[in-house]
Amino acid sequence: MKLLLLLLVALATVVVAMPPRKLRAGVPEKPYRYGQPKEGRKLVCYYGSWAVYRPGPGKYDIEDIDPFLCTHLVFGFAALDNTTWQITAFDPWNDLDDNGGKGAYRRFNALRQINPALTTIIAIGGWNEGSEKYSDMASIPERRATFVQSCVQFVQLHGFDGLDMDWEYPSYRGGAEEDKIHFAALLRELKVAFSAAGLLLTSAVSPSRVTIDDAYDIQALIETLDIINVMAYDYHGAWDTYVHHNAPVHGHALDSGNNTYFNVEFTINYWVELMGVHSDRLTMGLPLYSRGFTLDDPALNQIYDNATEAGIAGPYTRQVGVLGYNELCEIHRDQGEAFQTHWLDDLKAKYVIFERDGIRNQWFSYDDIDALAEKMALIDALPIGGAMVWSVETDDFQNTCGEGKNPLLNYILRSLNGFVPTPDPDRTTVSPPSSTTKPSVTIPGDDVCAQAGINPTGPCSGNYVICAPNGAEWIVTQGSCPPGLVINPEILNCDYPDHVAGCQKKKH
Ligand SMILES: *[C@@H]1O[C@H](CO)[C@@H](O)[C@H](O)[C@H]1NC(C)=O
Ligand SMILES: *[C@@H]1O[C@H](CO)[C@@H](O)[C@H](O)[C@H]1NC(C)=O
Ligand SMILES: *[C@@H]1O[C@H](CO)[C@@H](O)[C@H](O)[C@H]1NC(C)=O
């Protein structure tokens, strides 16, 4: 224990002693390298870094990213440590270079050596982090100051161009009513520090009118944010008991109550109204994934027909009621004629029905090129700054559908800016900067280290040690998964207990 403490102190010293990375001056004003894109519109692309643990053809690592298909790349996600109130790596073994880690942050930022026009951003938060910790942090000025300081250091240390705040959502999911005021204060304090450091500040925001009104002080957003990514999706999904679309352009005639707000057209117009002359900072979120249901009765397959059960889980994304576009491509390939797509002309949206165990009861709404065309036309008609996608790792990057690699990203960027830039032949070799953090403590670790890398400290535990071989000895660092996650021995990383044999919660 003493030794581990010593090790942690030693690591902390190394981090503090490191000179801050030289700033990339003038990042926001950086000219687009690839000529003069039509109106210079943005394509902000999120990357969900846990896709590196997906099996087989679903596995997606940093090197699978095509750095020419996006103007901004956002790494999802870093986490908030609610003992220190600092930003911290979510998955140190994957994200960092320390102790033989895989250096995903460094490799991600090195993509700018292939496309120098690219901007890279680290996102903190996301749906799984919840709201409570952020509410606890933002409510106390001293904690906010600590957090802000840690964010500037973190972004500079790892070489990102900026930070994306993904608190989902102030005043909701365990947050407090005062979160709206506290979030505004936090953004203003972040802005002061980020402006001084020449860094970008962006945020992903809710598409729901009720949440927007409760969560955001619009004036504070206008004063502080360089880009506002509107998550115009997840309107309907497995949590509903009836069929409806993940991200329809228009509403349905039977929509009532809050459902009248649950469509892209309403959301984006509402945000444009709120932002006024600052609307060019908005991007419209586009889902590269699908949400779906198991129909109660395969004959009743219209919007608002009953669907009490979620749709199937995909082999890679492994969440019921969700399929990546790449997973839909595989189902299409495997089911052939049984995979039947339909166009909803009132919603300007698409869905597919396919089989599970020989029954045609799987109803999934999704965005393909036809559906995206409607949304690109809406972007064209609005004074907004471009598009955003969640997320690059579920485009058809293996070309299973036969539309080419990454057909959706290619289509979106081409629609926005007229063409997809091609690599400069002189600059395609990446030489990532070498790791600068050197572990300084070595111990014999045979008791805890069965292999190099992550070793769980027990079955169904969220605690682990990272073992890096050093001659006959091991360099050992202790770590723990975010709350609620355990080590999955198959992928040797943090995972949901439901994905780990023998760790499933009892169902009743
Ligand atoms: C940290 O947050 C989790 C919930 O996200 C909570 O259970 C825990 O009590 C918090 N710890 C502290 C020190 O606030
Ligand atoms: C709309 O949503 C809000 C927040 O979830 C809820 O308080 C309100 O009752 C809903 N309104 C209707 C008509 O369902
Ligand atoms: C749909 O579900 C509701 C609520 O469970 C039920 O009352 C209704 O009869 C169902 N409709 C059909 C057509 O089965």
Image (spheres, helix red, strand yellow):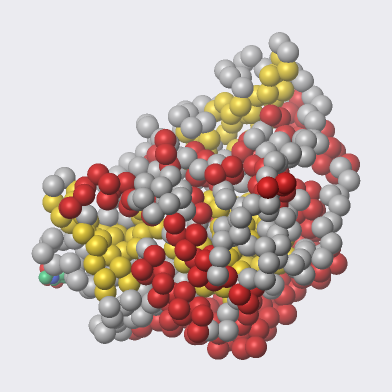
| Residue 201 position in % (x across, y down) | 71, 67
Above or below residue 83? Residue 239 is below
| Residue 405 position in % (x across, y down) | 46, 50
Q: How many marks?
A: 0
Q: Quadrant of the N terminus?
A: top right
Identify which residue is drawn at 31% across, 77% down.
347
Identify which residue is drawn at 13% across, 47% down.
358
Above or below residue 125? Residue 139 is below
Q: Nearer the viewer, residue 131 or 310?
A: 310
Name, please, the residue furthest toward the front.
Answer: 425
Identify which residue is drawn at 28% across, 60% down.
364
Q: Is residue 131 visible?
A: no
Identify which residue is drawn at 61% across, 38% down.
94
- What is the quadrant of residue 255 in the picture? bottom left
Q: Nearer the viewer, residue 57 or 19?
A: 57
Q: Nearer the viewer, residue 326 or 450?
A: 326
Is 232 on the left-hand or right-hand side of 450? Answer: left
Is 36 on the left-hand or right-hand side of 341? Answer: right
| Residue 150 position in % (x across, y down) | 77, 55
Q: Is residue 332 visible?
A: yes
Q: Nearer the viewer, residue 402 or 73?
A: 402
| Residue 76 position in % (x across, y down) | 58, 53
